[in-house]
């Protein structure tokens, strides 16, 4: 019997076609993030600062060009060249196995976008209301953690036992080491964003799992 054909996906060495197709979203996002990290590491300090300043989803950036920062921020880390790819891998592959490529991608993107808009929208409102200084409109907010949080929710709700264990480990790292929900009582940007991303993913997963009516089309 012939084994799985290898090297069928250009640039992904040693990964059988079937495995790549099954985990296409996870492989694509992880590979894209690692490539972006390599490029980031090769830049000069001033170029890194300029790139991060453009990619950050601050209120000021989102008001002028929302699309670019929303995309770029998911591929821009804070210099954690090993930890962040590991967090992505632990959560996204289990989520991808549970819901497939399209639904996993849509839910993770929804968590990232809605989490970002909710947290930065809160900042914009509080600045306009005089509760925060104007400098908060330029806060740095980059990283893949909203996507990771969304994938964790998918894996916990729908994943296999190994996927759930990996998601629990991932969540523990984000909460106890990364302080993902720290400052939630003060409505800090990251804490609000992580909570919103998790609730968005939970709502989407609940919708996906809802049985269809037999009398429906």
Image (cartoon, grey):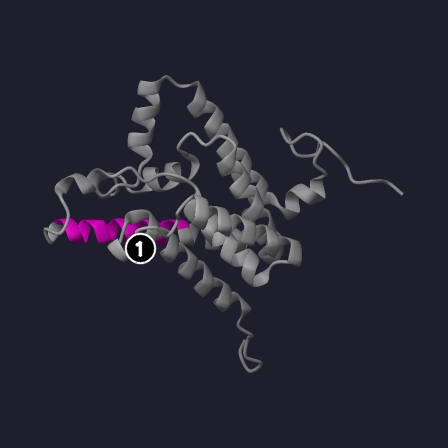
* Vertical arrangement, residue 137 with respect to residue 99, above or below: above
Q: Is residue 90 left or right of residue 64?
A: right
Q: Nearer the viewer, residue 180 or 50?
A: 180
Q: Which residue is mark 1?
A: 184
Q: Is residue 214 left or right of residue 46?
A: right
Residue 29 visible in the current orientation: yes
* Vertical arrangement, residue 127 with respect to residue 74, above or below: below
Q: Residue furthest left?
A: 130
Q: Residue furthest right?
A: 1
Which quadrant of the view contains residue 64? top left
Is 113 magenta? The answer is yes
The picture places residue 69, in percent across and down from the top left corner, at 33, 38
Residue at x 51%, y 53% (from the top left corner): 152
Give the prevailing secondary structure in the magenta stretch. Answer: helix
Q: Is residue 133 left or right of residue 152?
A: left
Q: Nearer the viewer, residue 204 or 185?
A: 185
Residue 101 visible in the current orientation: no
Q: Which image quarter is the C terminus in?
A: bottom right
Q: Residue furthest top?
A: 44
The picture places residue 39, in percent across and down from the top left corner, at 45, 23
Callout 1 environment at 10 Å: few (<14), some (14 to 19), or many (20+)? some
Q: Residue furthest bottom?
A: 215
The picture places residue 156, in percent across and down from the top left corner, at 55, 59
Is 171 magenta? The answer is no
Residue at x 70%, y 40% (from the top left corner): 17
Q: What element does badge 1 sit on?
A: helix
The picture places residue 160, in percent across and down from the top left corner, at 65, 58
- Which segment is the magenta one? 112-127
Which quadrant of the view contains residue 140? top left
């Amino acid at each position: 019997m012939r084994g799985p054909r290898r090297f069928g996906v250009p640039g992904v060495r040693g990964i059988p076609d079937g495995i790549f197709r099954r985990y296409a979203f996870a492989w694509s996002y992880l590979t894209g993030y690692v490539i972006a990290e390599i490029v980031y590491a090769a830049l000069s300090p001033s170029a890194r600062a300029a790139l991060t300043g453009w990619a950050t989803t601050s209120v000021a950036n989102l008001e002028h060009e929302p699309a670019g920062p929303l995309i770029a921020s998911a591929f821009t880390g804070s210099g954690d060249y090993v930890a962040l790819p590991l967090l992505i891998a632990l959560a996204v592959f289990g989520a991808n196995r549970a819901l497939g490529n399209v639904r996993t991608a849509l839910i993770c993107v929804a968590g990232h976008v809605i989490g970002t808009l909710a947290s930065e929208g809160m900042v914009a409102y509080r600045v306009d209301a005089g509760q925060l200084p104007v400098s908060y409109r330029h806060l740095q907010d980059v990283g893949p953690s909203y996507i990771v949080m969304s994938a964790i929710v998918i894996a916990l709700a729908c994943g296999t036992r190994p996927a759930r264990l990996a998601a629990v480990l991932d969540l523990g790292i984000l909460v106890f080491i990364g302080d993902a929900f720290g400052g939630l009582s003060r409505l800090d940007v990251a804490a609000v964003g992580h909570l919103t991303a998790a609730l968005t993913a939970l709502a989407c997963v609940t919708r996906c799992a809802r049985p269809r009516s037999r009398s429906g089309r």
